[in-house]
């Protein structure tokens, strides 16, 4: 806001968004699906931050998780499979004033969308990414995804998955200009909310892998961690997530981890049992692509028109000028 | 020591009366002993000349020539002999440029560079010439800056401040233009989106026109138009809103506050300085008032545009506000978006009415930036103690401006303009008025300075004024914080923590024996540079030096009774570099004492040696140390009984257990009643799907038991069994008549 009048008048507006203001329709996800917990946490965040619905946009690809924009009463873009990131980048580049969220799944992000994902990390554009990782293609009925456990029998791997799963958190940490990586689980809603909030507050590409249960095709996959809190490792830090005393009574296995320590983050990310939950890495000084590419001045129609005409004029050929094809240039 | 005591003392020590006349004092060329290294400024590297950088940004407003040369040498001079040769060549060039500038050449750096290089090359030939030419050529290729080169002269403060002011204006110009262009663009987007809903936009003709010619035969625009028209859409904008948008857009597209930069997109176009630079407060205020209506219209349009773009314009609330929008609605931060008005004043020519006008302007919130240039800052004894006060001078005006607490005030001499460049920029760019009180060090042609003419170069005199605390540098920023020490900064002064800066002095005695010592530079040393004070100083031959004579700074520290027995002196050198001791008259001592008192006040306000703060610091430190000691003692007690570390995800990490598990608070609830550990609910819809009256979500979409009687005990048990995070506790059945209770109680047991 540039002028004092705008600032003053905006303060007098008593807009107050309730959580219901962000709800849209009844989710079609299965009963018991972890996606519901993520949706609830995001709606809480929107309400707590009072994000104007018309200034918020959720972009997704294809998959169960990618139905997310339909359930948010904000702007949304349900895109192509694996292509959530390019769409979100375009939105952020053109409309940096919008709060951009990307919702993607393990299949969408780590398989068909991998190239976009890697470069989205590089670009480090200011957006919050929620990668719902249930380790299976659920929407298309039970096919192995890149994060499916080795040996998983599915419609596409009837003899069991041959390969070790990809580790999305480690992949993020492998990119030189990564700026925020966190891991959450859908069954600790308080932490899920806090981690998504931390991601939202970070300026840059904030990647949150949410480990999420699929009650339909992998109902028991995470039971050992859900049922035994001691197999969870909660990461806390004064400059990161703080664990409430109530949560500490249940989840006693904790580690003070400085999100600035990338090497330790890599070590933590490489271990799946105990399962780490928290902010693994954060670098507030990593420049954002939209800032690096911010134009010196706004692209007004006259300026764009003049620039285009200058370029076109370099190549315009007037064939009527002669039999030789007319090499005359205008300009 | 009173005047006649000076005579008595001098007679006692020398057997002669003090001559006390400037003509006798002057030919000796006496100057403070610490100036011995500065006899010829062209031979030394110091803060001048300054280059006023063309196309400067906030980070490189002005640069001393020495810094530019050092930067080039870092880039191009390799280690070793070759690099050393290059360094000598470049420093030779720097000296040549300095001599040219001191000789009065007022040109850009590149022109001076070429001129100096040609002069140097013409004096050599053969291999040395080739080597020199090579070094200078390489250096020239690495010269990244250009700009006007200025030496320290009477007009320097005005030139430097105008330059910085113009950079600040260009920044404002660019930012305002960007802001307004962006707002206009977004408003036009809203209007364009509105147009796209109209029948005209959906017509086949318009669609065809917007499509371009390449593939138009492939499409049926009639059909496309029919589809678009059939699609339901929101109605157009209300006419009142459309009019408001158009009106604001029209103001945003037609403003002329800054000169139009044209289409070349030049970023650092100099602002039309004639319109905003004035030599009097009155004319600046007139110019401001003439532009005020346009400024009000523009700010109003910007405010409406911002609210509209945010979708936050509420006609019921905002129409009335904008109907009465006038100059009272403007805040300083609004005015800061627009150019400041620079007023250049000379202290000597400022009448009483002008001073009053100046203080009025400084107490307003208008963007008036005033340069007040001082030429003669000595008062009282220096100007002749018998005279009545010559009125309020620059430093007093600066002090009064500080007390207004509305204006940004900066005081510095010419020698310290470069260290203060960022503060000057801040004052120029910020909201509200600013006063820049500058001592030029010039003994030039103004009537005021004629009387106090000094034989020293302006740079030396300006630096001496700051060193001696006679004209201390400070920055007062009323918006910088709550306390005085946040708002007032005196850090730019040399050795700001002490009364007088102390420097090392080495000299030889008559027997060619080396002596070294620390010499303070006091107010008396500065006053001694002024010929009007010749009568207050008397040189004493070395043969008459005795133990009663002590340096002025030590004398000033003595109690009155001790001082009676001592004779204060300062060290000066003459044109032949011979050291003299001069005893000092009481009038100068009194002035020095007053100067020190004012400096101490300034120090304390700036947070240096603040007595109360030091007391509190000592007290807090003691408390802190006691607490730390206590914590350490506790830690020592706890260390032997630390529990074993649990397995961790890696090594070398600090892993904690949070003590023995305590029962969850929910476990304390009576097991007879059903309950849910709501904070752990994952919102998965399992329970609500079983019975959405018994189970409901709270404001965080987490489940709670809304009504335990709204369903059966069987539903409670099934919900508990289905809950994937096992947070539903069914309790005891409430209806004892429900069938199958025995079996259900068994199933419920693991969850209670």
Image (cartoon, rainbow, N blue to C red):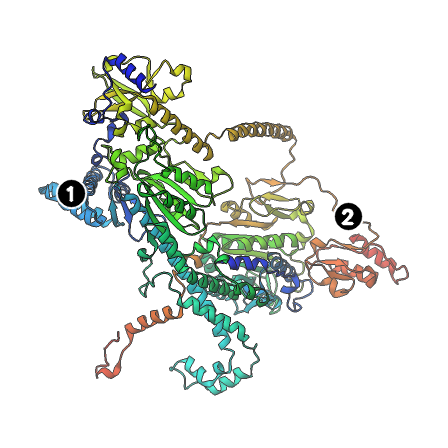
Q: Is residue B288 above or below residue B104?
A: below
Mark in front: 2 vs 1: 1
Rendered location of residue A286, percent (x, y): 45, 51
Q: Position of residue B240 (x, y in %)?
A: 53, 73
The x and y percentages for residue B670 are 82, 49
State which tag comes first along the sequence, 2 or 1: 1
B703 lies above or below B398? below
Residue most extreme to the left: B126
- Tell me residue B156's x, y (percent): 28, 44
Q: What secondary structure is found at the residue carrying circle 1?
A: helix
- Residue B673's label in the rendered image is none
Direction from residue B593 to residue B715 in the image, left or right: right
Disc sitting over residue B667 in the figure: 2
Q: Nearer the viewer, residue B358 or B482?
A: B358
Q: Find disc 1 in the rendering and name its residue.
A: B132
- Disc 2 is attached to a residue of which chain? B
B727, above or below B381, in the image: below
Q: Residues within 10 Å of mark 1 (few under 14, many from 20)?
A: many
Residue B455, picture quadrant = top left
Subunit ID for the residue under disc 1: B
SS state under label 2: helix
Does residue A13 show up?
yes
Give left or right: position of B248 versus A15. Answer: left
Of the 4 image quadrants, the one containing the C terminus of chain A is bottom left
**CA–CA distance in space, label 2 to label 1:** 89 Å
Out of B723 and B180, give the one closest to the viewer.
Answer: B180
Q: Is residue B74 left or right of residue B234?
A: left
């Amino acid at each position: 806001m540039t002028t004092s009048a705008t600032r003053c008048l905006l303060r007098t507006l008593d807009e107050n968004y309730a959580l219901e203001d962000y709800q849209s329709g009844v989710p079609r996800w299965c009963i018991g699906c972890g996606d519901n917990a993520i949706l609830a946490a995001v709606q809480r965040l929107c309400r707590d931050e009072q994000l104007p619905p018309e200034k918020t946009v959720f972009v997704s690809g294809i998959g169960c998780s990618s139905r997310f924009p339909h359930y948010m009463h904000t702007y949304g873009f349900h895109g192509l499979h694996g292509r959530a990131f390019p769409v979100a980048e375009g939105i952020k580049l053109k409309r940096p004033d919008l709060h951009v969220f990307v919702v993607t799944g393990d299949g969408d992000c780590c398989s068909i969308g991998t190239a976009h994902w890697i470069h989205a990390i590089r670009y480090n554009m200011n957006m919050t990414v929620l990668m719902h990782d249930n380790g299976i293609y659920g929407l298309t009925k039970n096919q192995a995804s890149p994060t499916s456990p080795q040996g998983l029998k599915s419609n596409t791997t009837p003899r069991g998955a041959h390969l070790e799963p990809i580790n999305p958190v480690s992949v993020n940490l492998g990119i030189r200009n990564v700026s925020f990586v966190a891991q959450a689980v859908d069954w600790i809603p308080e932490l899920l909310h806090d981690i998504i909030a931390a991601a939202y507050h970070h300026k840059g590409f904030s990647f949150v892998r949410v480990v999420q249960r699929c009650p339909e095709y992998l109902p028991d996959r995470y039971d050992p961690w859900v049922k035994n809190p001691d197999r969870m490792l909660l990461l806390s830090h004064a400059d990161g997530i703080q664990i409430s005393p109530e949560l500490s009574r249940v989840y006693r296995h904790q580690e003070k981890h400085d999100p600035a320590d990338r090497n330790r983050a890599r070590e933590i990310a490489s271990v799946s049992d105990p399962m780490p939950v928290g902010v693994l890495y954060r670098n507030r000084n990593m420049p954002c692509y939209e800032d690096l590419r911010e134009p010196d001045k706004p692209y007004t129609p006259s300026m764009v028109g003049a620039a285009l005409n200058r370029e076109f004029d370099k190549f315009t050929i007037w064939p009527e000028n002669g039999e030789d094809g007319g090499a005359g240039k205008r300009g | 020591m009173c005047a006649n005591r000076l005579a008595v003392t001098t007679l006692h020590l020398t057997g002669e009366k003090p001559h006390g006349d400037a003509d006798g004092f002057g030919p000796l060329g006496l100057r403070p002993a610490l100036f011995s290294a500065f006899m010829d400024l062209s031979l030394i590297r110091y803060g001048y000349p300054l280059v006023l950088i063309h196309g400067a940004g906030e980070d490189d407003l002005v640069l001393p020539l020495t810094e530019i040369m050092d930067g080039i040498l870092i880039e191009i001079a390799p280690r070793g002999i070759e690099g050393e040769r290059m360094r000598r060549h470049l420093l030779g060039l720097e000296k040549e440029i300095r001599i040219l500038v001191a000789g009065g050449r007022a040109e850009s750096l590149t022109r001076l560079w070429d001129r100096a290089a040609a002069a140097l090359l013409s004096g050599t030939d053969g291999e040395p010439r080739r080597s020199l030419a090579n070094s200078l050529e390489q250096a020239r290729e690495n010269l990244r800056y250009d700009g006007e080169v200025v030496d320290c002269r009477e007009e320097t403060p005005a030139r430097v401040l105008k330059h910085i002011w113009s950079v600040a204006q260009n920044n404002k110009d660019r930012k305002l233009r960007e802001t307004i262009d962006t707002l206009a663009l977004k408003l036009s987007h809203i209007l364009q989106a509105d147009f796209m809903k109209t029948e005209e936009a959906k017509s086949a003709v318009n669609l065809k026109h917007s499509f371009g010619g390449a593939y138009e035969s492939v499409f049926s625009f009639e059909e496309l138009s029919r589809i678009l028209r059939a699609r339901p859409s929101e109605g157009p904008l209300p006419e009142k809103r459309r009019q408001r948008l158009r009106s604001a857009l029209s103001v945003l597209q037609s403003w002329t506050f800054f000169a139009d930069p044209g289409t070349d997109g030049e970023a650092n176009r100099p602002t039309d300085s004639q319109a905003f630079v004035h030599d009097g407060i009155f004319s600046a205020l007139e110019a401001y008032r003439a532009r005020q209506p346009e400024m009000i219209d523009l700010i109003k349009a910007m405010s409406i545009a911002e609210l509209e773009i945010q979708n936050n314009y509420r006609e019921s609330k905002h129409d009335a506000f904008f109907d009465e929008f006038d100059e009272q609605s403007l805040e300083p931060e609004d005015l800061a978006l627009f150019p400041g008005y620079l007023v250049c004043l000379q202290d000597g020519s400022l009448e009483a009415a002008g001073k009053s006008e100046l203080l009025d302007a400084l107490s307003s919130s208008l963007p008036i930036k005033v340069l007040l240039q001082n030429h003669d800052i000595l008062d009282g004894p220096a100007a002749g103690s018998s005279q009545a006060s010559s009125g309020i001078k620059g430093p007093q005006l600066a002090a009064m401006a500080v007390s207004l607490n509305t204006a940004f005030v900066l005081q510095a001499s010419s020698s310290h303009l470069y260290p203060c460049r960022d503060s000057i920029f801040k004052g120029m760019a910020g909201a509200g008025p600013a006063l820049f009180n500058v001592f030029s060090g010039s003994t030039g042609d103004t009537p005021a300075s004629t009387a106090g003419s000094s034989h020293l170069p302006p740079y030396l005199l300006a630096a001496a004024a700051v060193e001696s605390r006679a004209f201390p540098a400070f920055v007062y920023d009323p918006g910088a914080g709550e306390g005085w020490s946040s708002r007032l900064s005196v850090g730019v002064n040399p050795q700001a923590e002490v009364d007088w800066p102390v420097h090392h002095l080495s000299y030889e005695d008559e027997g060619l024996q080396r002596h070294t010592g620390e010499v303070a530079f006091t107010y008396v040393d500065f006053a001694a540079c002024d010929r009007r004070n010749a009568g207050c100083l008397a040189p004493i031959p070395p043969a008459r030096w005795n133990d009663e004579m002590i340096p002025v700074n030590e004398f000033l520290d003595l109690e009155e009774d001790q001082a009676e027995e001592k004779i204060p002196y300062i060290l000066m050198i003459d044109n032949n570099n011979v050291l003299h001791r001069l005893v000092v008259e009481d009038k100068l001592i009194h002035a020095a004492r007053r100067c020190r008192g004012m400096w101490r006040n300034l120090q304390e306000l700036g947070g240096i040696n603040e007595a109360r703060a030091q007391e509190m610091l000592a007290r807090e430190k003691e408390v802190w140390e006691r607490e730390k000691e206590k914590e350490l003692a506790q830690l020592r007690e706890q260390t032997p009984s630390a529990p074993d570390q649990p397995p961790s995800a890696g090594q070398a990490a600090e892993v904690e257990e949070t003590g023995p598990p305590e029962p969850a608070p929910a476990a304390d609830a009576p097991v007879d009643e059903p309950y849910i550990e709501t904070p752990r609910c994952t919102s998965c819809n399992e329970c609500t799907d079983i019975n959405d009256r018994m189970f409901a979500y709270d404001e965080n979409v987490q489940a709670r038991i809304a009504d335990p009687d709204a369903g059966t005990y069987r539903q409670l048990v099934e919900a508990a069994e289905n809950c994937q995070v096992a947070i539903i506790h069914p309790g005891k059945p409430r209806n004892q008549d429900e069938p199958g209770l025995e079996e259900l109680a068994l199933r419920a047991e693991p969850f209670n």
